[in-house]
Structures are given as C-alpha cells and as structure tokens.
Image (cartoon, rainbow, N blue to C red):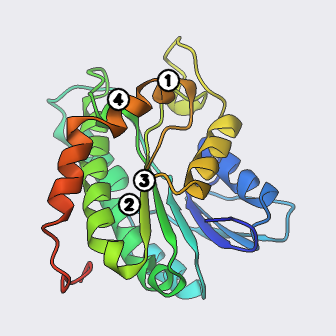
Amino acid sequence: MNITNKTVMITGANRGIGRALVNEALNRGAKRVYAGTRGALEHADPRVTPMALDVTSVSQVERAAREVNTLDVLINNAGIALYGDLINLDSIEQQLAVNLFGTLQVTRAFLPLLKRAKGAIVNNLSLVALAPLPVVPGYSISKAAASNMTQSLRAILAGEGVTVHGVFLGPVDTDMTRGFEIPKASPESVAQGIFDGLERNEEDIFPDPASQSIAEGWRSGVAKAFERQYAGFVPESTAVLG
C-alpha cells in the first residue's frame, strides 16, 4: 500500500498520534486526507478535509460515510484511556464504547468504499492488548477486545481484498501518557512507523522502540500461530459485517 495519490481517513485526528498521522500521510503524497475529530480542526493543506466525527455517534459516523466518495485507507485512531479499577463499570463501558465499538462502527460504515478500492484498515491498538497495565484495566480490556476484533476482521475480509492491520503501540508522548515517567516515542516517529509497516504490508505493526522489542517474538509465537490456524475456519460465503 503506497500512500501516494491515495485517499486516507483518520479518526481522532486533532492531536497527538492522529495529528501526526495526518501530516505523515500528506508528506507521503496522499491525495486526500479526511480528518475525523470531535472538536474543531484547522489545517493549512487543502488536501485535508476536517470532519466532525464522534465515533460513538451513529448519526455522525453515517453522515461522514455519506460525505466520502472514495477511500483507500481507514485508520481507526480515536481512543480514550482512563485511570481506574474494575469496580467502576461506567468507566469500563465508556472505554469500550470508543476503543472497541467505535472502531467497529466506523469500519462497518466505510467498508463498502474499502472493498471497492481493495483498501486497508489500520487499527491503532496498544501493547496492553497483549498484557494488561493494571492501573488502566478498562483501557487494557478495551484494547484486548479491539485486538481480537482486528484478527477476526483480518480473516473475514481476506477474501474481499481488504487488508487489516493491527498497530501495537508502546508508550508515546501524548496527553494519554502524561502521568507515566517512562521513555516515550514521539507521535511523529510513530506515525512514520505505522505508514512504513502499512507499506510493507505487515499484519501487525510495531512502530516504536518498546513495541519493536517484542515484534519477532509475537510474529513467531503461539498466539500468532493460533490466529493463522483459526482463520482457516472462515467459510468463503461468510457475510461480512451484515
């Protein structure tokens, strides 16, 4: 997937990794970048089309899908992480609403365009999808679920010519990790790593130093072997997302 002259949709595009992804897509020659945000976004490049998009809002997602005529790459980047415990169910449900169901809802809405283009879906996940960080259990649960969903989509859509990529992010220097005093990658370097992995057609993308340290072990490990094995159970006639 070469980004040059491609149309890209990025959710959560107003700051942090999302904003860096918008700029990196432009740097790589994207023809059009749809920047989905919950708040206002201004960008000097005329190739950027800001879109009001709360991924938990059915009406906003459906309206956004109607406003896009063609799409090659969908990057599901919108997400939230809340400190807490396993007692506050409202907090867990809020994170699932954005990180899991929001991602699925946006994917469903834009899938017809992606199938037409034989395009790509990129889901920004986290290393906590593989092992939970106990201070953010709700976030960890939501990213583990989103990772499992990503694997399912990959198998289901393989016959449709749509590739599905999971991005396992380590610590990145954004508002989300402000409370952690640990080494962090810059959003700009992570955005470069994500597009590099997409252009190399990597199913699982490890775009930063922390995630790269486990990349080989993950790709050759038993969990990945099970994913490939279970993908063989998908019948050719499977209905894709309704």
Question: Percent from the top left, x then y, of residue 56?
Answer: 38, 63
The image position of residue 75, as x and y in percent, is 52, 60
Amino acid at pointer 3: Glu
Q: Name the residue under label 2.
A: 103
Circles 2 and 4 in contact, beta carbons < 8 Å: no
Determine which of the numbered discs, if any, sits on residue 217 in the image. Answer: 4
Question: In this image, 193 relative to 120: left or right?
Answer: right
Between the residue at mark 3 and the residue at mark 1, the CA separation in whole angstroms equals 18 Å
Q: Which residue is drawn at 55% across and 22% down?
A: 178
Q: Which mark is residue 210?
A: 1
Q: Earlier in the sequence, mark 1 or mark 2?
A: 2
Name the residue rendered at 85%, 71% in the picture.
46
Mark-to-mark CA distance, 2 and 4:
27 Å
Determine whether the residue tagged by mark 2 lies in a helix, strand or loop.
helix
Tag 3: Cα neighbours inside 10 Å, few (<14), some, or many (≥20)?
A: some
**Residue 131: image tag:** none
Marks 1 and 2: which is nearer the front? 1
Sequence-first disc among 3 and 2: 2
Q: Mark 3 points at which residue?
A: 203
Q: Which amino acid lies under the numbered mark 1 shown in the image of this protein?
A: Ala
